Image: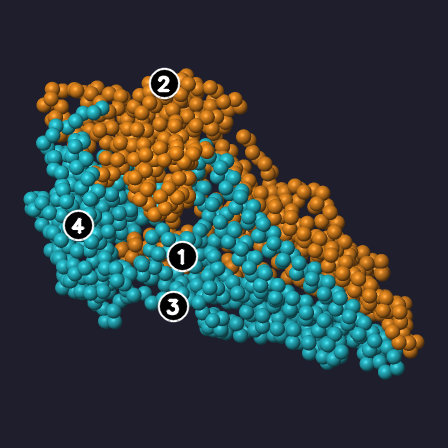
Amino acid sequence: MGMRRRGGPAALSREKQKRSRPLLTLLGRTLSYLGRFRKVIVVAAVFVLLATIFSSIDPLILSWGIDFVLTPGSFFSGLFLLGVIYVVLRLAGWLLNSLYTWTLSGAQAGFVQALQQDVYTQLVQADLSYHKSQQSGDITSRVTSDADALGSGIQIIIDFASQLLLLIATLYLMLTSSIYIALTAGVVFPVVILIVVLFGTVGQRTMLASQRALGHVSGQIAENLSGVHIAKAFNREEETAATLSQLNQEAYHYGFRFMMLMTLMQPLVRATGIAAVSAVLFVGGSLAVGTFPVLTIGQVFLGTILVQRFLRPLLHLSTMATQFQASMASMDRLLDILEAEPSVTNAPGAIPLSPDSDGIAFEDVTFAYVDGVDVLEHVTFSVAPGEMVAIVGHTGAGKTTIAALINRFYDPQQGRILIGDQDLRSVTLQSLHDTVALIAQEPYLFDDTVMENIRYGRPSATNQEIESLCRLIGAHEFIEVLPKGYYTLLTEGGSNLSAGQVQMIAIARTLLADPKILILDEATSRLDAYSESLVQAAQEKLFANRTTVVIAHRLTTIANASRVLVFEQGELIEQGTHDELLALGGKYKAVYDTYYAHQSADELSEEAIRTAQEELAGTHQKPPEKRPRSRGDSPPPRSH
Amino acid sequence: MTQQRYKSGTRYQLSALSRYKGLTLLAGGLALFAALLTVLPSWFLGDATDALQYAIDNGLGLTPTFVYYCLLILGVAGALFVTILAVGYAFAIMTLRWERDARQEFFEIIQENSMTFHDQVDSKQLLAIAMQDVRWVRFSLNPALRSMIMSLGSLIITSIFLAIIDWMLGLLMLFGAPLYLFFAYRYAKKVEPVRRARSEQNEVITAISQEVFRGIEVVRAFGTEEYEENKFEEASKEYQRLQTREARLASFYIPHLIMTAITFISLIYVAYYVLLGIYHVSTLVRVLGLLTSFDAFSFMLPRFLLVLRGANINAQRIVKLLSWEDPLQEPEHSADVDWSQDIVFKEVSFRYTSNDGENDSYALRKLNFTIPGGTRVALIGGPGGGKSTILKLLLRLYDPTQGKILIGGVDLRGVHTRDVRAAVGLVEQDIFLFRRSVKDNIAFGGVGACEEEIIEAAQKAQAHEFIEKLPQGYETIVGERGMTLSGGQRQRLAIARTLLQNPRILLLDDSVSAIDAQTEFFLRKALDEVMRGRTSITVTQRLRTLLESDLIIIVDKGRLVAIGTHQELLESSDHYQRIFERLPGALQHVKQSTRSGGAR
């Protein structure tokens, strides 16, 4: 935890990762994806093929026109015919090109959509461990930017084909009109190679450096915006602006380099084009004069046009390289997701959880998130139908893991977990999630109205049902006084509500779903006394007649539980009722003193006890040698 | 601070150019010159053809005139290289500097806006605008505008050259060129609504996915995967539709046809005159050369037109945010305040402005009370009662909607926020730490604090010990994606930060209830330390804090319910009794105090 170094909001700051698959594999997968749109793409390809052929021969008509007027005895009608052919060719080229764009646009957007949907579905089904290890912003950019980038990658692949065709057609025309002109056109090659090399090396590097620098700027802005109230409270606006300015300057520095490199290309290409015209003119001219002229003036003119044409696809191809690389990198990241096999899936022949199945049993369960580091070891316990059981223990004892396992977010490495007498692995996930509900420590609410957030528990619930439910649990009162009551829009996961209110809504949502089994991870903090009592009362309604496992943080909850399970470092070490365990004087007693005792009425404001507890808490990792027990003996000192 | 820096999106878009007027003129002139240079070779091609024709007709070899024109074209190539490079360099300087400064300016203005603004505008959107929208505007100037200037330049120069050759051709261009531009413009305009809809739809998709991935556990727990997938499919299908529509706009580009028509007419016209023997073949070569080379160099024009128009929408978005009117105005002269004096709330009402402009929820209503200087005050009440709002008003993060807050008899509106925030310190409920070292986070409280002062503050806040145990001690990076600290640890860091600031008035939002005994013990010690010798206002529900306060203020639903000492309220206020009874340990305390004979 806390080890990931990638800075800044997702899309902008992604640092270059090495591609993990060979280019051909990526290309193959991309093309196979395109297979779904085979028909459309074949049609588009025919259009572009014809369009290219038409547009590559139209300069031929112009050169014929020149030669035609030079031929003695030509008639105007012949000239007009040439003109008409020219127009027809151009028109046909234009029409075909437009049809190509029109057709391909649909396929391209469809491709992006299909890909987005697949990636999204895969992500929604993906293992929770994957989601836990990634920032939600990063995951989102897989769906949005990466899919988009691949969309333009498709365009490049298809453009590539048409540009290549144009190149070949132009080359063929040059060769047929004169081998010498074709050879002369070769003067542009060194420049093209220079451009390719320049972009492959320096260009690539500069682009990455520039992206990284921009990522830092973006990260800094994001942080400054979330801490804007602190910058204001401490009068440090100038400082945050100065920090940003520094990063901004750095981004400018790299951005300028990259821009100059890009800018260099244009004059290079244009100047080369014109220099090539000059060369072709000279060579063509030498061949057109003399006693045995090989070329006509029209052919020389054709050469000058063709040599410029020749440069365009070459240029296109070379600039595409960078973009192509980027989209293949996107495909690589997408394949990581698409090819990942979720480890928790419906087993073949999985059956729905039977309506009679109730109660939970852990049978010798061992689980590790990472191999070799067991979080739970040989845990065995059972919860009877309708029973409420509390789980307590220090941080890292494995409490949250138990909740995750009952929901089958993960499968245990050893042992099995049963609901009723059905192994979780043998039932369908859908039926499991219909039966079991989980309320997390910090419940997540969607950016939707209060009403819709509660309805999430059961989409078919009516407004009246929701309202009467809220009345029942005591949430109606505060919801009603929100700016728009039940229709108040929650923003940024409920940041416009207090923590207590968020929990109340989450409780209402779960009650609406009316699950047979409930797993609740109690919130540890940030509840004021008023909300505390409200939540407590609502929880009692929630627990009534329901198989419940609570990761408890409140004394009242523990006291009400029919049994308490005490965990330490992944092992179940004690179980019994609150009173039994206190009397036992073991680990539960120690945990109780550290976390719960000061919540109880008897223990308040007695400094001496507090100090004792503090020492206890401080030594719970080490073997306890001495345990000062000054409970109740010394009178509370009144220092203030 | 009345802003209105930019009157319109277009002005904003062009501000990169208006900022460097001289350089813009120079770059513009050079761009036109470059356009001339791109056209010249076609002209010389005609001359070369003449020379070639002469040589052929007279059975000569290559004439010096022909070679001269070949070399001239080569020379133009060289000059063109230098000129375009110079144009590119000038544009790179202007636009990239502008991008850098625009981003900085955007951030600084946004940061200066009061919290009302930040409540209304989602920070994700602000970030997207600072990064992407600014970038799109820059992109519309360089390369889009830069290339378009050259394309337009060569259209004009080509027209002029054609007019020089034959006035009829000039006339043709006089009609053809505007028609060409008209259709190009119309085409670019069509993209606007589609582009806007598409960007918005993109935001929708982003929002949907981001939300689901953040709340994936809820989706899983309620088994609503299919529902969410359908929701996404609907949104992404709509995006697909818009994307298709935008991409299809690029087909059937009319200006292309106009160019074809012009070329056809010129070909027939000039060739006919050549047939008649009025013109040389060189004229035909020249005319066709001019027209085909324009065609070749304007193939990027449609795309850049779209970029230019599209970026105008981005610019409008930016200007809209930049010209936000802040209801909180700074005074011209900041009044002097004796911060150790009484704090008086006079008829204070406040309402938050909600996103959709329907600001109907009052957070505070006609609040009246006086806090004597130097006292410890506890602020209690139900959720959403207005406690945090009172603290925010005292920090002047907002101004009251009605009524006023006086400190030492001075209205807070007359005091510059800078002075208010130097004198008033805050320890918030949700502690925000920057992604920096522990040391720097504490030093955030005091400009230029030395290491010893920082450690001293940490010690007083009971934070020194745990900081020492962190992997890199005071140099450990905390904050987002940094070392994870517990709530109690964060709170103590925040207290240290405030101790270093040494404010005259201290505001504490201490709403944590269930924490372990050790943390609570340390926190209390730290709080005792930080409250010493200043007026303090604490939002709390700790029994002990209530008992130790000089004054307790109860607010509920934005109204003042009761004010007084613990004993007074216990006797006079039912509301207080109710709250008090709910507090853990309260009953025991009452029993104890009755046993020991009432008040201590």
Q: Residue at x 45, y 41 (%)?
A: A224
Q: Are marks 2 and 4 on the same chain?
A: no
Instruction: Specify whether disc 3 shares its chain with disc 2.
Output: no
Q: Which residue is mark 3?
A: A339
Q: Position of residue B129 (x, y in %)?
A: 51, 46
Q: Which mark is residue B513?
A: none
- Residue type highlighted by circle 1: Ile
The image quadrant of residue B299 is bottom right
Above or below A46: residue A391: above
Disc sitting over residue A391 in the figure? 4
Q: Which residue is at 67% across, 55% downward?
A: B147
Find disc 2 in the rendering and name its residue. Answer: B342
Q: Which residue is mark 1?
A: A139
* Shown colour of chain A: cyan
Q: Chain of mark 1?
A: A
The kind of secondary structure element at disc 2 is loop
